[in-house]
Image (cartoon, rainbow, N blue to C red):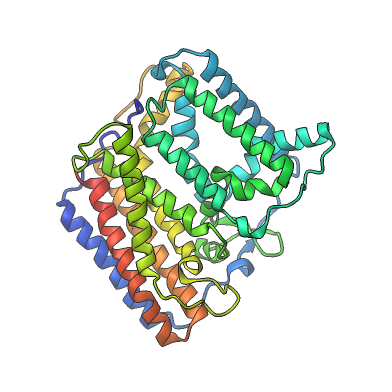
């Protein structure tokens, strides 16, 4: 892919990679010990938490969605009719950098922004009115869960990391058009709720939005809250584990493929590596949550699903670590193509600062995951059992932490 993935992001810490990985693992273990001593009962309030804030103007959402729809159409048109060379066409830079990478910080700060902006929802509503179809449709069966979104994110990961010429502007425009047709057709049959199940980008934004300081309380009020309270509102659903594991596996292979540890090239090897990385991450998580009996209480889900929400901050941390420099540097290419700047400025952030952001994002993501796992455990089990349940989960998190640090910082 011609886009400059992770410019200047490797080997930038003033300490060896192995020491950084060891320190990150020790921070996670220390966090677990402190939680076991100081956090013996549930403390997070979930959907009941938050300080009320003034509501935004009612027309703000429709206006923003209309603007997003116009911009999405413009990107597709530019992809089909603009310059055929990737460096000169806005479409691939907008999709892979501004949208895909930018969606992470936007959702972490403001909540599920793509649910508000999603042009596909606007297109579906328009077609439903024209065709005189009930926008609610038949409804999405509960057993479907988030499995379609997991499939979408897996295919997008393959497109980005394994497909031949993934940044070709014509291919980008064709993929966006095909995706819109499939998603809107599904929504016309199953209803507008389909997007919360089948649009992988909206699902990803919504999961990240659970960690945002801005959110909706259980009564619908806009509130300022502790992000961990927001994470506690993520309930077990079919496919939730698959969504986050696909994201983790994709990001892990992205880091691996850009290091000297993966010398193999070509679509076939990239596909093998992508599937293998996802399978390894999945196996590690299943081993960490291997207790087979169902969780008691309101969740009534196997442990991998009951604790799946704890993977969200880990996935967020990985995304920030891997794509921070891509957003900072390659994001400027859009400004250059629009004529607002002559060239990309590679001095805006130093390599040391990039490495610090990478390491901090990974560690903070795993610490947040450890807190969320402990909270869920003490809610579902007696104190002694809750600690024993977390031992294998902690082990899997420590391994993920050390591997993540090694992948983003190793040359």
**Residue 18 x/y as whole percent:** 16, 55
Total number of numbered labels?
Answer: 0
- Taking 28 as reference, is 206 above or below it? above
Which residue is drawn at the image coordinates 14% and 52% (left, top)?
A: 16
- Taking 243 as reference, is 339 above or below it? above
Residue 5 shows in the view: no
Say which of 274 and 199 sits in front.
274
**Residue 366 x/y as whole percent:** 36, 61
**Residue 175 x/y as whole percent:** 53, 29
Q: Quadrant of residue 395?
A: bottom left
Q: Quadrant of residue 75?
A: top right
Say which of 269 and 42 sits in front.
269
Q: Is residue 257 left or right of residue 125?
A: left
Q: Is residue 75 left or right of residue 131?
A: left
Residue 333 shows in the view: yes
Q: Quadrant of residue 70?
A: top right
- Taking 44 as reference, is 74 above or below it? above
Which residue is drawn at the image coordinates 70% and 33% (left, top)?
A: 123
**Residue 288 x/y as whole percent:** 36, 69
Position of the N terminus by quadrant = top left
Which residue is drawn at the image coordinates 25% and 33% (left, top)?
A: 265
- Residue at the left extreme, as displayed: 16
Which residue is drawn at the image coordinates 36% and 28% (left, top)?
A: 3
Position of the C terminus by quadrant = top left
């Amino acid at each position: 892919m011609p886009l400059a993935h992770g410019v200047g992001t490797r080997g930038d810490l003033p300490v060896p990679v192995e020491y950084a990985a060891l320190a990150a693992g020790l921070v996670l273990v220390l966090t677990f010990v402190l939680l076991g001593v100081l956090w013996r009962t549930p403390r997070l309030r979930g959907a009941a938490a938050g300080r009320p804030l003034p509501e935004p103007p009612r027309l703000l959402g429709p206006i923003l969605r209309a603007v997003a729809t116009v911009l999405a159409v413009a990107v597709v048109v530019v992809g089909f009719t603009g310059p055929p060379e990737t460096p000169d066409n806005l479409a691939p830079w907008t999709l892979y950098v501004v949208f895909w990478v930018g969606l992470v910080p936007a959702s972490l700060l403001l909540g599920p922004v793509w649910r508000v902006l999603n042009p596909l929802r606007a297109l579906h509503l328009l077609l439903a009115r024209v065709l005189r179809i009930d926008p609610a449709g038949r409804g999405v069966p509960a057993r479907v869960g988030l499995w379609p979104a997991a499939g979408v994110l897996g295919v997008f990961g393959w497109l980005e990391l394994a497909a031949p010429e993934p940044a070709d502007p014509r291919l980008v425009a064709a993929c966006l058009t095909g995706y819109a047709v499939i998603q809107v057709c599904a929504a016309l049959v199953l209803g507008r709720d389909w997007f919360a199940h089948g649009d992988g980008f909206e699902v990803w934004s919504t999961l990240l939005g659970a960690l945002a300081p801005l959110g909706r309380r259980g009564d619908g009020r806009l509130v300022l809250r502790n992000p961990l309270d927001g994470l506690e509102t993520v309930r077990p659903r079919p496919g939730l584990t698959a969504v986050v594991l696909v994201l983790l596996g994709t990001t892990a292979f992205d880091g691996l493929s850009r290091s000297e540890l993966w010398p193999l090239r070509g679509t076939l090897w990239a596909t093998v590596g992508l599937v293998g990385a996802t399978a390894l991450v999945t196996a590690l998580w299943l081993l960490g949550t291997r207790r087979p009996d169902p969780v008691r209480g309101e969740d009534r889900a196997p442990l991998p699903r009951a604790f799946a929400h704890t993977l969200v901050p880990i996935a967020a941390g990985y995304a920030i670590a891997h794509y921070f420099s891509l957003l900072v540097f390659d994001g400027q290419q859009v400004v250059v193509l629009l004529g607002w700047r002559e060239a990309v400025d590679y001095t805006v952030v130093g390599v040391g600062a990039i490495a610090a952001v990478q390491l901090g994002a990974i560690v903070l993501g795993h610490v947040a995951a450890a807190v969320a796992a402990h909270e869920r455990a003490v809610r579902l089990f007696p104190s002694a059992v809750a600690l024993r349940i977390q031992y294998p989960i902690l082990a899997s998190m420590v391994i993920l932490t050390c591997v993540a640090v090694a992948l983003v910082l190793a040359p």
